[in-house]
Image: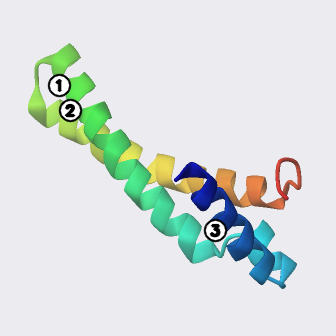
Amino acid sequence: MIIDQIFTWNNNKSKKTNESEINSEKPARSIVKAISWRIVGTIDTILISWFITGKITLALSIGLIEIITKMVLYFFHERIWNLIKWGKQ
């Protein structure tokens, strides 16, 4: 079962001839990943803020601010890492 997955992965990888398809992501993918990750992260921040402050309105305010700032930071972080060749095949 695991062997089949390894061979399938190797076959799919060898079919890709364009190196940019193997080594990079499109900016739209980074945007979607940033949004989905921020949803998870913001829920975590809101819960922690609510637990610490005991005020849901303050927790939601903190969550609203951090969702925007951290999405922007994550997007640029992803794009910079996409330029780094280390760890790519």
Q: Residues within 10 Å of mark 3 (few under 14, many from 20)?
A: few
- The quarter of the rendered structure image containing the C terminus is bottom right
Amino acid under disc 2: Ala
Residue beneath disc 3: 8
Percent of width and height locating residue 69: 48, 48
Specify the label residue 4 is tagged with. Answer: none
Horizontal and vertical percent position of residue 80: 76, 55
Q: Image check: 73 left or right of 64? A: right
- Residue holding disc 2: 59
Q: What residue lies at 56% left-to-right and 76% top-to-bottom?
A: 28
Residue 73: x %, y % from top left: 58, 49
Q: Earlier in the sequence, mark 1 or mark 3?
A: 3
Cα–Cα span, label 1 and label 2: 5 Å
Which of the two discs, 3 and 2, sits closer to the camera? 3
Q: Are marks 3 and 2 in contact (CB under 8 Å)?
A: no
Residue 27: image location, x then y, percent: 63, 73
Neighbor class of circle 2 (other Cα within 10 Å; few <14, some 14-19, many 20+) is: many
The chosen color scheme is rainbow
The answer to which quarter of the image holds residue 13 is bottom right
Q: Residues within 10 Å of mark 1 (few under 14, many from 20)?
A: some
Q: Residue at x 79, y 67 (%)?
A: 23
Labels 1 and 2 touching (C-beta < 8 A): yes
| Residue for badge 1 | 50
**Closest to the observer: 76 or 78?**
78
What amino acid type is highlighted by mark number 1? Answer: Trp
Q: Along the polypeptide, which appears first: circle 3 or circle 2?
A: 3
Instruction: Identify which residue is drawn at 11% across, 25% down.
Output: 55
Q: Is residue 86 above or below residue 33?
A: above
Check the image and report above or below for 9 versus 66. below
